Structures are given as C-alpha cells and as structure tokens.
C-alpha cells in the first residue's frame, strides 16, 4: 500500500491549526495531544466534515483533498469509530454490522463478515441489542461495523476514553491486531500517552494547533520532557497460567503471581522492574526472569529506557544514569529482572 501524507491549515476565531505529517501505509499511527490541542479539528478536516483553507490529503495514493479536489465524506472510504459507539439501538448487533457492509459497493468489499466476527469475538453477540452490551462489547461492535465498510483508513477518536480500566484492557489486544489481520492502516487519537505508547508504531503529537514531536514513542518521549517526569511505559507480557498462582512464558520461565490473576496477560510497569547482574543469594526465584538487552535509549540526562527481549517479547525498563553506567548493562548482555510489582488481569 502506498504511504499517505497529510497537510492541513484551518482557522476559526481564536484558533489556528497548521499540521503536516506522513501517515505510514501500515500499522497503527497515533495522534496525541492534550484537550484543546486541535486533534478533533484535524480529524474532522481529514474526514471531510470541515473544509480547511488549505489542505493536501493523500491516503494510500488517492487524493482526498487538494487545491482543486474535495471529496465528500462518503467518498473518502474512511472508517470512523468514536468515543461514544453510536450504534443503532433499534437494530441487533448483526444488523448494525451489516449496515456498513450493505452500503459498500460489492467491488469494494475486501473484508468478510466471518473474519470480523472471528477476530473481534462477536459471534455470541449477534442477536443482542446494543443496550444489552457492556461498554467493551459495544466498542468491539462499532469497530466491526467500521471494518465492514472496507475502509482505506480506519480512524479511531478516543475510543477507550469512556471505558473503565478493565474494559480498556479487554479492547487493547483487539486494536493491536487490527492492522495485521486486515491490512488497513489505523489512525488512533488519544490524550493518554501511556495508552498511545502501548499501541502506536508511529506518533504525531499536537499542541495548540502545531506539531510538537513525531516518531516512535521513544522519539516522542525524548522530545517532550514534561511527559517524562510523570510517565513510564506499561509492559504487557503473554503466557499461560500453568497452575494457580504460576505464570509460564513460552520459553519455560515461570514466576509467581497473585492467585486471583487468571488472565494470560500480565502488566508490568517499567518502574516496577529491577535489573540484576546475578540472582541475589538464597533467592528462590519466584519473581525473577531472564532476558537479553536489545537497546538502550537515553530520554534525558536522568532517564533511560532499556529494551529487553523476554521470551520473544519486548520489555521496557526505566533506569537512571547510575544504572546504565554499570558495565554489565550493555546491548547483547543477558540480564536478570526482579519483578517488584505485578498488575495482573483478573478474568
């Protein structure tokens, strides 16, 4: 798929937006910024709901807007998912899903109903009405309906903002799989940096109508030092419950977890992991894992992010300047990780 690029200039009393950035042809791109940054204005322009004074919007090699072109919203092949799910309450889940599919020309249909049902686990919900769905279920249906239009770009405007923490955790794994499963680039909008860092391959940070930073989350964190003072990334690792209170990774490593945790996902914050050259004396190893250091990113003078490969999964650990000065903390070095706190998920 051809890469996309966006340039938008838009003004209204008291606010000016000037933004220009590339949009990768695959994966998840993130539009991040505080309230009032211009995120909603930008996506309304992108969707054709506002007509900016000057714009060049090229999505997948097709021009949506330029000096002499302006495609109406329905011509842009854009899938939209909002914070409020906007399902049709008088229709079943099945008919909500078919609403987008039936209104897509047969020659443009690239995504099958069966694939969406399987990927989003929607089959058990087909005969329900929206008022009978949980927040997370409703959002999955909204995502499915948008996918069934076979869009050139899937745009999600703070889709998790209205959900509780558990529903957010339930939805995130589905979002991560969307581009890989269906080959559709996703532009995800959020004011939550932790959420964005866990999802986006590429980020654009907007503030007061201007781009402050762009790149992967390490690049962005380096460019936005105010974020670094209060933020450390969450790591989500996958494995299996081999016995009550025992979590087993794909390489056979096992750690002890709270007995109430029954999910195959664990959440480990980057500040809750200590790096050790060797296990402490007389240590039983019930919270110790071993991985390999892949790279070290200096975010500022006092903060570094160490990326470690653990059973084929990336783990990020926050270290101060003294930590990375240790000779045994270097790229390619096998390292022990003491897990000081586990935020597991209870299913």
Image (spheres, rainbow, N blue to C red):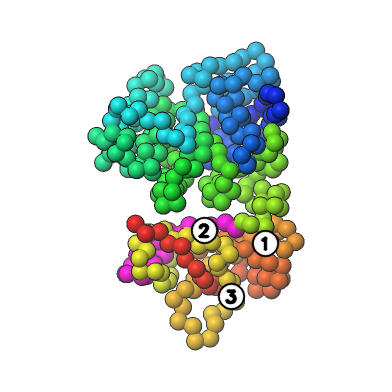
**Prevalent SS, magenta region:** strand
Residue nearer the viewer, 15 or 33: 15
Callout 3: 10 Å neighbours few (<14), some, many (20+)? some
Per the rendering, the mark at residue 6 is none
Q: Please tell me whether mark 1 sits on a helix, a strand or a loop.
A: strand
In magenta segment, residue 162? no
Instruction: State the residue at coordinates (71%, 53%).
Output: 225
Give yes or no for contact between labels 1 and 2 (Cβ–Cβ under 8 Å).
Answer: no
Q: Which residue is mark 2?
A: 235
Magenta stretch in the rendered image: 232-250
Residue 326 rendering spot, x and y as whole percentages: 69, 73
Q: Please tell me whether mark 2 sits on a helix, a strand or a loop.
A: strand
Q: CA distance from mark 2 to mark 3?
A: 18 Å
Q: Which residue is mark 1?
A: 304
Instruction: State the residue at coordinates (52%, 35%).
Output: 157
Instruction: State the residue at coordinates (61%, 56%).
Output: 231
Callout 2: 10 Å neighbours few (<14), some, many (20+)? some
Compared with residue 106, is residue 274 higher up or lower down, i.e. above or below? below
Q: Which residue is mark 3?
A: 276
Residue 224 rendering spot, x and y as whole percentages: 70, 49
* Mark 1 or mark 3, earlier in chain: 3
The answer to whether residue 95 is left or right of residue 39 is: left
């Amino acid at each position: 798929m051809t890469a996309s690029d966006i340039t938008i200039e838009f003004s209204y009393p008291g606010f000016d937006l000037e933004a220009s950035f590339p949009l990768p042809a695959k994966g998840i791109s993130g539009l991040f910024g505080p309230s009032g940054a211009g995120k909603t204005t930008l996506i309304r322009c992108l969707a054709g709901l506002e007509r900016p004074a000057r714009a060049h919007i090229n999505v997948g090699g097709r021009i949506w807007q330029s000096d002499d072109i302006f495609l109406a919203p329905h011509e842009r092949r854009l899938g939209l998912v909002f914070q409020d799910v906007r399902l049709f309450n008088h229709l079943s889940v099945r008919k909500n899903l078919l609403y987008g599919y039936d209104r897509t020309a047969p020659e443009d249909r690239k995504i099958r109903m069966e694939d969406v049902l399987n990927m989003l686990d929607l089959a058990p919900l087909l005969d329900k009405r929206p008022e009978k769905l949980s927040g997370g279920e409703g959002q999955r249906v909204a995502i499915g309906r948008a996918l069934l239009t076979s869009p050139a770009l899937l745009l999600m405007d703070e889709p998790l903002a209205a959900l509780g923490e558990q529903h957010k955790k339930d939805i995130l794994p589905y979002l991560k799989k969307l581009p890989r499963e269906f080959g559709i680039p996703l532009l995800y909008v959020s004011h939550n940096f932790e959420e964005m860092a866990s999802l986006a391959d590429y980020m654009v940070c907007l503030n007061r109508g201007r781009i402050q930073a762009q790149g992967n989350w390490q690049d962005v964190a380096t460019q936005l030092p105010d974020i670094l003072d209060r933020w450390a990334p969450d790591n989500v690792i996958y494995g299996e419950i081999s016995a009550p209170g025992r979590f087993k990774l794909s390489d056979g490593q096992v750690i002890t977890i709270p007995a109430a945790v029954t999910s195959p996902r664990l959440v480990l914050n980057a500040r809750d992991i200590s790096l050790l050259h060797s296990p402490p004396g007389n240590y039983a190893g019930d919270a110790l894992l071993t991985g390999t250091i892949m790279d070290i990113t200096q975010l500022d003078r006092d903060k570094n992010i160490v990326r470690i490969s653990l059973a084929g999964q990336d783990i990020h650990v926050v270290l101060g300047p003294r930590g990375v000065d240790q000779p045994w903390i270097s790229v390619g070095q096998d390292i022990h990780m003491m897990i000081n706190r586990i935020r597991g998920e209870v299913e």
